Image (cartoon, rainbow, N blue to C red):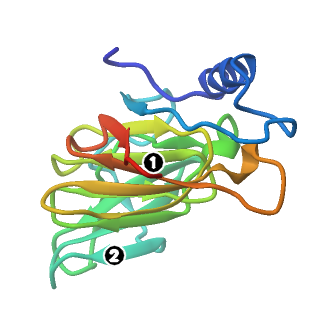
Amino acid sequence: MRGRTLTAVGAATALAATAVVGISGAAAAKPKPAKTVKGDLITAKPHTLKPGSKVSGQGIRVFVSSKVGWELAAGKGAQYAAVTTDGGKTWRTASPALHVNAAQAPLVVTQIGATSAKVAYAFGSGQVADVTSDGGKHWYGALFNGTVMAVVPGIGKQLVAFVDGGANASGPTAPTWQYTSKNGGKTWKLTPGS
């Protein structure tokens, strides 16, 4: 559904739904990952910075060339992806607010990565992976049933997410699931054998 955003209410609903089907909670001996996870279009939120707003440029950064880099920036109580095209002299938001800190604290992202000026992704400490494949014009946020430990480039234009299912498992071994997206984070498919 286009235009939906990840919200604390949406996350709670998704987690409640997984509990109903029996794949969440301490009693689950063998958690089962979703075969497909769909990303929702992240849209602008009230009282947040608009894409293109200048930011201080003091967050976590990754450069894809000597001039172009991506940053995980903070401002107005939210997290944003920011981009530079002048080697880090100026940074401008290249996303709507990815997560509003007060409302979406469990879903915040802590890391950013990029493969080019068009493809960037944010993840870490939560259950979400946010991805753009068009230089920040559109961002898709996917909510996984576990902690997203890493998002990395795959073969060709694929992205690969590694998800720790341990939050939903009992016992000393926690499963790690591997998901692949071939369409810029709109859809993630469980890799066979995960």
Q: Which residue is mark 1?
A: 129
* Quadrant occupied by the N terminus: top left
Residue drawn where x is 74% and y is 61% of the image: 173
Packing grade of label 1 (10 A; few <14, some 14-19, many >=20) is many
Q: Amino acid at mark 2?
A: Val
Residue 125 at x, y percent in the picture: 63, 58
Percent across and percent down for residue 144 are 54, 39
First in residue order: circle 1 vs circle 2:
2
Between 51 and 140, the residue placed more toward the observer is 140
Residue 137 lies, with reference to residue 113, above or below; the image says above
| Residue 24 drawn above or below residue 192 | above
Residue drawn at 68 percent across, 39 percent down: 31
Closer to the camera in the image, 180 or 151: 180
SS at mark 2 in the image? strand
Tell me the quarter of the picture where residue 29 sits. Answer: top right
Give the residue at x 47% y 29%.
Answer: 45
Judge left or right: residue 111 versus residue 61.
Answer: right
Q: Is residue 55 visible?
A: yes
Q: Residues within 10 Å of mark 2 (few under 14, many from 20)?
A: some
In front: label 1 or label 2: 1
Q: Would residue 101 be visible to someone looking at this image? A: no
Secondary structure under tag 1 reads strand
State the separation of the CA atoms marked 1 and 2.
17 Å
- Quadrant in the picture for residue 184: top left
At horizontal 86% and vertical 40% (from top left) the residue drawn is 26
Left or right of 5? Residue 133 is left
Image coordinates for residue 35, horizontal then vertical, percent: 44, 33
Q: Horizontal placement of 72 versus 181: left or right?
A: right
Mark sitting on residue 62: 2
